Image (cartoon, rainbow, N blue to C red):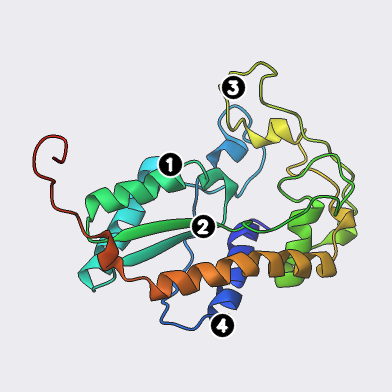
Amino acid sequence: SLCADPLVGDALLRKAADRVEGNLVILPTIPYALVLHHGNRRNPVYPGIIGVTEDTLFRQFRDIAGCLVRDGFRKLLIYNMHGGNSMYAPTLAHSLEREYPELCCFTCFVTAGMNTQGMFDEPSSGHGCAFETSLNLHLCPAFVWLETNPPVNAARSYGLEAPAQARIFSDWTWTTRGHGYVGDPRQASAEAGEKLAEEALAVLVPTLEQLAALDVSVYAPVERPNGPFGG
């Protein structure tokens, strides 16, 4: 599916919200993210890779956050459902707080709490692996087609062996040897997906409860101390 990340993330968020005591507003999932490295101009193999640039993503969040501030919201959790956004999400939250000082921004990644160690015997993990496919089988099985019998696929490493690593994301078609996925999705199961989902919810639910109860006045600016060193 071209929308696996938002399908899984949205399902987890709504399950969590059903378990939370407190007032929450879940905004519609933003389906377009930083995905252009999956099929850039050097290797544009896969149709349907529709993404946005960092500038566009920020402008979108800035406009949405402005509407929320206008309507009285003071807390915003950015629930990140896509690995390509991971490096940018903290910067995005910081930028929104700079733009709107009255808004407190937080981020949480969809896999927080999930433990896949020893769960699957596959050479690589990432898009379409047993881990991701299991989550889809549990949360949105209508979008999984394992009857295609995909072969095991080990990802190419795009990092340097030396300490300095210049490239964080190469084009995905190169990394996946043209398959578009890595690992062994045939090992996936809905039972494994349910376990992973519950682990994620064990982190997400208390996070939402804490934010719902949070008094943002604790973040009010403090007065400047007397003297240059607070004396």
The residue identified by callout 4 is 18
Q: Earlier in the sequence, mark 3 or mark 1?
A: 1
Question: Dot 2: what SS?
Answer: strand
Residue at position x 60%, y 77% from top?
A: 15
Q: Note whether residue 53 is visible.
A: yes
* Real-space Cα separation, disc 2 to disc 1, in angstroms: 21 Å
Nearer-the-camera pick, 10 or 75: 75
User: Label 3: few (<14), some or many (≥20) within 10 Å?
Assistant: few
Q: Amino acid at mark 1?
A: Thr
Q: Earlier in the sequence, mark 1 or mark 4?
A: 4
The residue identified by callout 3 is 165
- Left or right: residue 116 compared with residue 92: right
The residue identified by callout 1 is 53
* Real-space Cα separation, disc 3 to disc 4, in angstroms: 42 Å
Q: Is 134 located above or below residue 40 in the figure?
A: below
Residue at position x 49%, y 65% from top?
A: 29
Q: Position of residue 149 (x, y in %)?
A: 90, 54
The residue identified by callout 2 is 108
Nearer the observer: mark 1 or 4; the answer is 4
- Left or right: residue 40 compared with residue 172: left
Marks 2/3 in contact by CB < 8 Å: the verdict is no
Marks 4/2 in contact by CB < 8 Å: the verdict is no
* Real-space Cα separation, disc 3 to disc 1, in angstroms: 22 Å
Marker disc for residue 75: none
Q: Quadrant of residue 193?
A: bottom right
Q: Amino acid at mark 2?
A: Cys
Q: Quadrant of the N terminus?
A: bottom right
User: Label 1: few (<14), some or many (≥20) within 10 Å?
Assistant: few
Q: Earlier in the sequence, mark 2 or mark 1?
A: 1
Q: Earlier in the sequence, mark 3 or mark 4?
A: 4
Q: Position of residue 73 (x, y in %)?
A: 29, 71
Q: Earlier in the sequence, mark 2 or mark 3?
A: 2
